[in-house]
Amino acid sequence: MSEDAAFEYAVRALGRSMRTEAEVRRLVRSRVGFGVRGAAMIEAVIARLKQYGYLNDAAYAETYARLRQQNEKLGQRRVRQVLGQKGIAAKIVDEAVAARYSQTDEETLAREHLERKRIPKPTDQKETMRVVRRLVAAGFSMSVISKVLRQWEVPGETLSGLEDMANPDEESGGE
């Protein structure tokens, strides 16, 4: 495969969906193969994509964080995790998430997530734990989760167990 063909392949892939630099590298590598020639071709394709403004991990991270916050109502932990898995540098991820979530009340966002998913107020401990698991998977901290459950007036023994999970250092810190 020639460099121009690899570039066209990468442009078509980016036309289908936004991708990170790591994802484009993986896609192009599958076409051009490994080795010195393949690595040089991948670097040339990536450089051209950046030059034309088709590939920008910082813009990808900002867009991803904005969409996940506004549309899916996800917490910042989940957004950080996914962006890291997509191969974006930790510094870029930190900047994008900090910019997006700095003015956000995560407690309100967690409530909006529950409303969006149509998760009702739990009536027993089993349902409470299901809500907790859903919110943890959505990227919310245990302190935010316990605040949400406290406003739902979940029984005290369930909340105390959650708060122990949220603050594991308090029990073992004095030993």
Image (cartoon, rainbow, N blue to C red):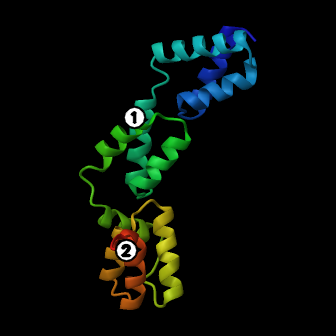
Figure disc tally: 2
Q: Residue lying at the far front in this picture: please name it.
A: 175
Q: Which mark is residue 82?
A: none
Extreme-left residue of the structure: 103
Residue 91, picture quadrant? top left
Residue at (47% x, 61% y) in the render: 138
Query: Disc 2 to disc 1, how far (Cα)?
Result: 39 Å
- Can I make out residue 17 in this image? yes
* Residue 151 found in image quarter: bottom left
Image mark for residue 92: 1
| Amino acid type assigned to the residue bearing label 1 in the image | Ile
Above-or-below relation of 88 to 169:
above
Left or right: residue 68 versus residue 32 is: left
Q: Is residue 108 above or below residue 162?
A: above
Q: Can residue 71 be spotted in the picture?
A: no
Is 21 left or right of 99, judged from the image as shown? right
Residue at 49% from the left image edge and 88% from the top image edge: 125
In the rendered view, tell whether residue 161 sits above or below residue 77. below
Q: Residues within 10 Å of mark 2 (few under 14, many from 20)?
A: few
Report x, y in % for residue 82: 51, 47
Q: Secondary structure at mark 1?
A: helix
Disc 2 designates what residue?
175
Q: Quadrant location of the C terminus?
A: bottom left
Question: Nearer the N terminus, badge 2 or badge 1?
Answer: 1
Query: What's the residue at 46%, 13% (across, down)?
Result: 51
Looking at the picture, tell me which residue is in the foreground, 8 or 152: 152
Q: Amino acid at mark 2?
A: Glu
Q: Find residue 5 and report its horizontal and vertical position in percent.
A: 69, 12
Expressed as whole percent of the image width and height from the top left, the position of residue 43 reads: 59, 14
Q: Residue 90 lies in what quarter of the image?
A: top left
